[in-house]
Image (cartoon, grey):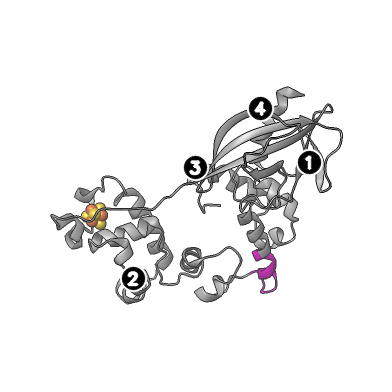
């Protein structure tokens, strides 16, 4: 849940989720549509689906996580960072999970730009030096917290920092500049909504957009300048999703029929999962019916 999502957003969802599925065993028996429904509001639904697949895989191994990082990393949706975090937090393995905060801490301690550091080597080298106690999981978590609370991206709190004595950033007159490449891609799309007088919208799971795949959406196309025959233009707006800024032209038309692979959904309530991206569109066309 925490991948690409802030802690404060995750907390209520986490409680709701773990109340319903308190352990891996109960989750492994769940249906995907129920998991995705419960995930509503968190976005990035691929994570929910991967989580479910992972629990089903683990059910064959007595619901236990593999001990080796390479094995954990083979599970769906788990990359290097998550594998290292899990290994430390679940198995108390002496490793470092390099998230944005931890990378920044090491980059400052060496006063060297992140792109010039070999974090794998740092991990191997430090596994003997740093892990001299038996609380490896706590140590890994503390490193992340340290980066977020003390060695902050803006205004690091060097005066209170216990690492100050060894920190080249603090001592140096030529401090590294931090550069993060958060490039937002602009995409121009046209969204076409079939609506009817029963207050329904035609949605399909057949869009292939690179985001929200296999979820109920209106017809969406990359923008072209062709005339939108029979479609009425409703509005233009911007919507951010993942690292994309979508510039949307929203069109609609009243229709009794919808193409194959479309289904009618009620504008108000649906038992089937509808992503918040679609709900936002629905809220904009509701007044038309
Ligand atoms: S002294 Fe400052 S820059 Fe260095 S690790 Fe501590 S908080 Fe970060």
Q: Nearer the viewer, mark 4 or mark 3?
A: 4
Say which element carries label 3.
helix
Q: Secondary structure at mark 4?
A: strand
- Residue on which the image places disc 1: 271
Between discs 4 and 3, the one toward the N terminus:
3
Quadrant in the picture for residue 278: top right
From the image, tell me which residue sits under label 2.
Answer: 118
Q: Earlier in the sequence, mark 1 or mark 2?
A: 2
> Which is in the foreground here, disc 3 or disc 1?
1
Q: Which of pointers 4 and 1 indicates the residue nearer the eye?
A: 4
- From the top left corner, tell me how far across and down residue 170 is, in percent: 18, 55
What residue is shown at x 80% (from left), y 44% (from top)? 262
Residue at the spot 22% in from the left edge and 61% down from the top edge: 111
Q: Name the dominant secondary structure of the magenta segment.
A: helix
* Mark 2 element type: loop
Region of the chain picked out in magenta, as a range: 54-63
Q: Is mark 1 within 8 Å of ligand 1?
A: no
């Amino acid at each position: 849940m925490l991948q690409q999502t802030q802690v404060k957003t995750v907390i209520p969802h986490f409680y709701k989720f773990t109340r319903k599925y308190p352990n891996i065993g109960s989750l492994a028996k769940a249906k995907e549509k129920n998991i995705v429904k419960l995930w509503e509001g968190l976005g990035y639904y691929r994570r929910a689906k991967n989580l479910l697949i992972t629990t089903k895989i683990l059910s064959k191994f007595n619901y236990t996580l593999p001990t080796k990082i390479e094995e954990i990393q083979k599970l769906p949706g788990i990359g290097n960072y998550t594998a290292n975090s899990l290994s430390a937090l679940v198995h108390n393995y002496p490793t470092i999970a390099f998230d944005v905060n931890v990378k920044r801490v090491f980059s400052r301690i060496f006063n060297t730009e992140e792109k010039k550091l070999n974090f794998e080597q740092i991990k191997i080298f430090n596994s003997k030096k740093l892990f001299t106690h038996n609380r490896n999981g706590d140590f890994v978590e503390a490193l992340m917290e340290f980066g977020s609370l003390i060695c902050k991206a803006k205004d690091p709190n060097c005066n209170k920092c216990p690492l100050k004595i060894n920190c080249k950033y603090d001592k140096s007159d030529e401090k590294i500049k931090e550069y993060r490449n958060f490039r937002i891609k602009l995409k121009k799309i046209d969204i076409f909504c079939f609506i009817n007088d029963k207050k329904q919208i035609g949605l399909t799971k057949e869009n292939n957009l690179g985001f929200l795949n296999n979820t109920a959406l209106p017809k969406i196309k990359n923008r072209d300048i062709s005339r939108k025959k029979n479609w009425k233009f409703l509005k233009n707006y911007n919507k951010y999703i993942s690292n994309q800024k979508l510039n949307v032209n929203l069109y609609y038309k009243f229709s009794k029929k919808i193409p194959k692979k479309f289904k009618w959904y009620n504008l108000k309530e649906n038992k089937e999962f509808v992503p918040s991206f679609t709900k936002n569109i629905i809220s904009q066309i509701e007044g038309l019916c």
